[in-house]
Amino acid sequence: MRNRIESAMKVGQISEEIRKQHKGFGEWDLVSDPRNHQTILQILIDGRDGKAMDVEGQPLPTLVYLSREKRPKYAHNFKAGAMNALIRVSSRISNGEIILNVDCDMYSNNSESVKDALCFLMDEETGHEIAYVQFPQCFNNITKNDLYACSLNVITEVELAGFDSNGGPCYIGTGCFHRREALCGKKYDMDCEREQTTRNNDGKIEESASVLEETCKVLASCSYEDNTQWGKEMGLKYGCPVEDVLTGLSIQCRGWKSIYFTPERKAFLGVAPTTLLQTLIQHKRWIEGDFQIFLSRYCPFTYGHKRIPLKLQISYCIFLLWGPNCLPTLYYVAMPSLCLLKGISLFPKISSLWILPFAYVMSSSCAYSLGEFIWCGGTLLGWWNDQRMWVFKRTTSFFFGCSETILKQLGFSRSSFAVTSKVADEEESKRFEQEVMEFGAASPMFTILATLALLNLFTFVGGITRVIIDMQAQVLDSLLLQILLCGVLVLMNLPVYHGLFFRKDATRMPCSVTYQSIAFALLACSLALY
């Protein structure tokens, strides 16, 4: 199987021999547009067939290929719509009580994960109240120092574990074992315990595989969900870029609990973004969806009132309010630097006792952050990359995600779903492994990054020049903290300067972005001096 998959990937198409074995592939020959086609469904392996054995003579489970119907006039609701179609079709073919959901770029790395999840879901004392068991999202292509901070180690090792202790983790969209009835909208009550104890799912389906294929196609049709509760009270929620978080919150508000489990051997592995732009776009979608939930009727403080504990409501809002963090970050990245250029002091003098609280907060925050990062398995350079990426994300992804959410709430924009590309060519993969930051595309996000980087470079040079020219101790005394802050930002932006002025390859910062950012940075400096 593995050899056949790898050979198909190299050639870029399915071999004629395999096409003849599976009629589902042949149906794609009649499709001219992947967004306009009929339901394509085939039972590749029928688990009821006694001849369905592996090379060791062990029985194989049922394997079904499904591509739901898509038509231009119908909203397909992206990943949530696909998941709901799979839930309905699987309920007709196997109707298993437990559903495992993983992203298309992820694979199982620990065969014990199924047993681990079932230990929670089938526990005699509390298993009946567990809706889903969430495993951390991990990646197999993270470099040693995690250039783009994609591993999110602190979040998966610390914050989600804390989430778990506050009432159960959120659903993060992959690596999750669901109880079917909870995912389909059922509310939890004490009857659920009795039903799960007495349930018998041994009912055998008599139809042949070909008959099942035809009867199940209607369940994946575009019109099936019309005038139903699918996407509202049943299945995954529609209308939000982070349908997973919203769905998990709704399940918990129906009385169910969840479990977060981090085995020593990672349960599932996927592919992290390999370019800066991919990373920023992915986080923009997350921020957009999270902030949208907070501003909607599903805000944990209102929707979750008297349904989930207050500490769990607060745990959700810590993530849902990432977006507005762009405002203080943008202020600290730009205003102290501009004021430095003008000679305006924003912080206490070094000789003043009031500097002590500032020094304590900054040093303790950095020390705690570094210690936490190292404890989670990171490196010193990895921590520095993580700090850089938090600044990059907050000034671009968070800003655009927050702005677009507000525009949608005001009716000036519509929801979209930006899919993160996980396909990298050989050269791109090589640069990623060497931890060389990739730019290449002309994006408004890069214009903001480059403008802020140049702004801090210009003001840092201007501040140092002011200190040297004036040669007065009180100038340094009043402006030292701003010079230090500006200098740290310059160090963080070294890859940006390299991409702007020194790199000559195709992934350097585009010339249009370079010219625009220089103009914007000079304009801001001129206004500050005026």
Image (tube, grey):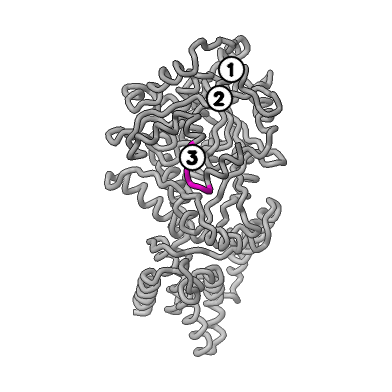
Secondary structure found at label 2: strand
- Is residue 409 visible in the rendered image? The answer is no
Tag of residue 132: none
**Residue occupying the far front of the picture:** 17
Q: Residue at image x 53%, y 19%?
A: 94
User: Which sits earlier in the primary sequence, circle 2 or circle 3?
Assistant: 3
- Say if the magenta span includes residue 451: no
Q: Residue at image x 34%, y 79%?
A: 530
Q: Which residue is mark 2?
A: 45
Q: Please say if the residues under marks 2 and 1 sit with CB atoms less than 8 Å apart.
A: yes
Q: Which residue is mark 1?
A: 49
User: Three-letter amino acid code at disc 1?
Assistant: Asp
Secondary structure found at label 3: loop
Q: Which residue is mark 3?
A: 14
Give the residues drawn in magenta, as a range.
10-16
Instruction: Pinpoint residue 65: horizontal percent, then vertical percent.
Output: 49, 29
Instruction: Pinpoint residue 528: horizontal percent, then vertical percent.
Output: 37, 76
Secondary structure found at label 1: loop
Q: How many marks?
A: 3
Indicate whether 387 appears above or below 187. Answer: below
Foreground: 422 or 319? 422
